[in-house]
Image (cartoon, rainbow, N blue to C red):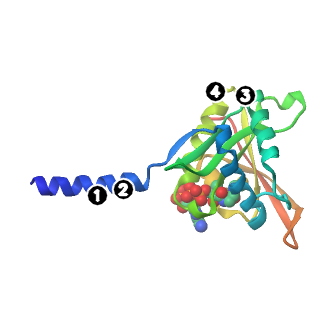
Amino acid sequence: MEEIEAGVHYVINNLQIGFMIIIRHASKNDLPQILDIYNDIIHNTTAVYYYEPHTLEMRTKWFEERQEQGFPIFVAEEEGAILGMSTIGPFRVPTAYQFSVENTVHVAATARGRGIGKLLMPPIIKAAKELKMHAIIAGIDASNEVSLKLHQSFGFVEVAHFKEVGYKFGRWLDLKFLELTPIP
Ligand SMILES: CC(C)(COP(=O)(O)OP(=O)(O)OC[C@H]1O[C@@H](n2cnc3c(N)ncnc32)[C@H](O)[C@@H]1OP(=O)(O)O)[C@@H](O)C(=O)NCCC(=O)NCCS
């Protein structure tokens, strides 16, 4: 009996080790890893429409702006490695947009498909609610089936489809806006 219990305990521990992912607020120390994830996405995907890599200075400025504006940045950490991030920030500048935010969620290429995107969504939705926001907008490349599915699974609904507004890797890109409102 003891042996069986020990065996079960061992397996559970192994499973826990495999999935010991912590979602927490980002710190400045995380920025180099967040930058690496972002630059890989710039280089290899149409998830973001930049061509050139960002610098640590740009990420630091972005981090400080989010702090000043009171918007959180969350990271997924596993054994000290940052595997993904999510955040909300201003949708547009004019004051009447003050109750709308735009969200971002990115997972490292090596960690995709493990449910980390799904773990990073609830904290930003909760934060938006606590900040008394009324709408969250996600701008998603129309070919990004995984991100579309991820957002739809949290109640986001497609509200706009812009045709050929981006150009990257030698082709035109369509951009969709999905919106979550009211925020549950
Ligand atoms: C989009 C992204 C954030 C999703 O994060 P992720 O950790 O890979 O996704 P998850 O493992 O949490 O899966 C989310 C959903 O997509 C599905 N999914 C994940 N990978 C998939 C794949 N390759 N093909 C089809 N479906 C997939 C999952 O099954 C899950 O759906 P379910 O709830 O029905 O099971 C991540 O893939 C990513 O960072 N991609 C590159 C950058 C990007 O596109 N960012 C979003 C910009 S809007």
Which image quarter: residue 1?
Answer: bottom left
At label 4, which amino acid type do we have? Glu
Q: Residue 169 at what x, y percent from top left?
A: 84, 71
Q: Disc 3 versus disc 4: distance between alpha carbons?
A: 11 Å
Neighbourhood count class around disc 1 (C-alpha, 10 Å): few under 14, some 14–19, many 20 upward: few
| Labelled disc at residue 15 | 2
At label 1, which amino acid type do we have? Val
Q: Secondary structure at mark 3?
A: loop
Whichever of labels 1 and 3 marks the residue nearer the N terminus, that label is 1
| Labelled disc at residue 70 | 3
Which image quarter: residue 125?
Answer: top right
- Marks 2 & 1, CB-CB < 8 Å contact: yes
Whichever of labels 3 and 2 marks the residue nearer the N terminus, that label is 2
| Labelled disc at residue 68 | none
**Which residue is at 52% across, 59% downward?**
114
At label 3, which amino acid type do we have? Gly
Which image quarter: residue 49?
Answer: bottom right
Q: Disc 1 versus disc 3: distance between alpha carbons?
A: 42 Å
Q: Secondary structure at mark 1?
A: helix
The one nearer the camera, 60 or 178, is 60
Judge left or right: residue 18 versus residue 54.
left
Residue highlighted by disc 4: 130
**Which residue is at 75% across, 65% downward?**
45
Hey, which residue is sitting farthest left in the picture? 1
Whichever of labels 3 and 4 marks the residue nearer the N terminus, that label is 3
Residue highlighted by disc 1: 11
Q: Disc 2 versus disc 1: distance between alpha carbons?
A: 6 Å
